Amino acid sequence: MSDGGGSVRQRKKSSGDGSGNRARKPKSTSSSGSSAPSTAQQHQMWARIVLMVGIAAIVYFTTFRTREKKFATQREVLELRTQPLDCSRPYLDEISKFAGCIPNQCGRFVSDKIVSPAEAGILLDLARAGFELGQSSGGASILDLHSGALSKGTQFVNVYRLPEAKKLFTNQHINVYRHVKAKIQQAVADQFRLSVDALHLTHPTFFSRLTNATAKTIHDEYWHEHVDKETYNSFHYTTLLYLTDYGKDFTGGRFVFIDNEGKHNRTHVYIEPKRARVSGFTSGAENMHHVEQVTGGVRYAITISFTCDREYAMADPKFALDDDEEEEQAGGTNEGRMNEP
């Protein structure tokens, strides 16, 4: 009995010990489940985050992409470089009305062989002389020899009303200005296969002087992207003649075409200004552009614009009268006289 009773008691004790052990195992498992992730789990988590960020970056940079391309550098000496483009539909619809003035293909060109450095130097002297009489307080000054508009402070004055101007502008200045304009006009006609007689000088055609001064008025903010045909209704062909050198006379101030390729992809096409360099382009939306902000020095250039519409044509500026007219109107003297346009 005792053995039998003891044996029964022993089995119960053993059974209790076994059940106690089984009860403690889940507690151990529960404690393990509430602890921080293991090192391996952390590594896996970070790997997933890095992968997700990488995929997002790839999607972003393939969807929103801006590339850069240099169309003309300052070191190059270019006979002629061209880039054909499809005309924008509004531009083509409008210009189709003007026989002899329709481009064989829209686009842009640049050349260092149209205007000589000596001619550019004379025009630079003219510009500097004009800006001695007035400059914008905001860093973007213009001198329009046709209308007489000259930046002064935050306003414009008529340079032909300033007595000092008569001593600054010479017959050499006006003759070189006219000659250069004619050569650029011929270059535009040749490049786009136009009749030169169908091209007419139009307003505004002006000298520009750009510095890094803080803009004071909207006229000083020259760096905004724009389309010439939308800004100036008269424009059909735009040209620029640079009078100073990028990287030498000034920093910043590159001319930038903006080519849109699809909804999000863009290409910025750069021209580095160089003395006597001429760039020209059709004025429609195919040639959206802007000028970088000048960061140092002084950038001089001339914008010379052409129209196919005779209604917007303007004559060359007339600083001084011919010798015979001078003698007749100035009492026989040979002193040059400027006339207000």
Image (cartoon, helix red, strand yellow):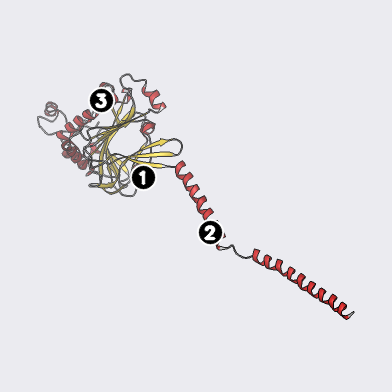
- Work out which quarter of the rendered image holds the C terminus and state it: top left
Cα–Cα span, label 3 and label 2: 66 Å
Give the camera-side residue of 214 and 170.
214
Give the residue type at disc 3: Asp
Taking 171 as reference, is 268 left or right?
A: right
Give the residue type at disc 1: Thr
Let me know if residue 185 appears in the view.
Answer: yes
Circles 2 and 1: CB atoms closer than 8 Å: no
Vertical relation: 274 (above or below) 315: below
Decide: few, some or many residues near mark 2? Use Cα within 10 Å; few <14, some 14-19, many ≥20: few
Describe the element under mark 1 as helix, strand or loop: loop
Decide: few, some or many residues near mark 3? Use Cα within 10 Å; few <14, some 14-19, many ≥20: few
Cα–Cα span, label 2 and label 1: 56 Å
Q: Which residue is mark 3?
A: 190
Image coordinates for residue 216, horizontal then vertical, percent: 35, 47
What number is the disc on residue 25? none
Which residue is outermost to the top? 99
Vertical relation: 266 (above or below) 38: above
Give the camera-side residue of 20 and 132.
20
Decide: few, some or many residues near mark 1? Use Cα within 10 Å; few <14, some 14-19, many ≥20: some
Q: Which residue is mark 1?
A: 217
Q: Which residue is mark 2?
A: 43
Give the camera-side residue of 160 and 10.
10
Cα–Cα span, label 3 and label 1: 38 Å
Give the residue type at disc 2: His
Viewer-nearest of labels 3 and 2?
2
Describe the element under mark 2 as helix, strand or loop: helix
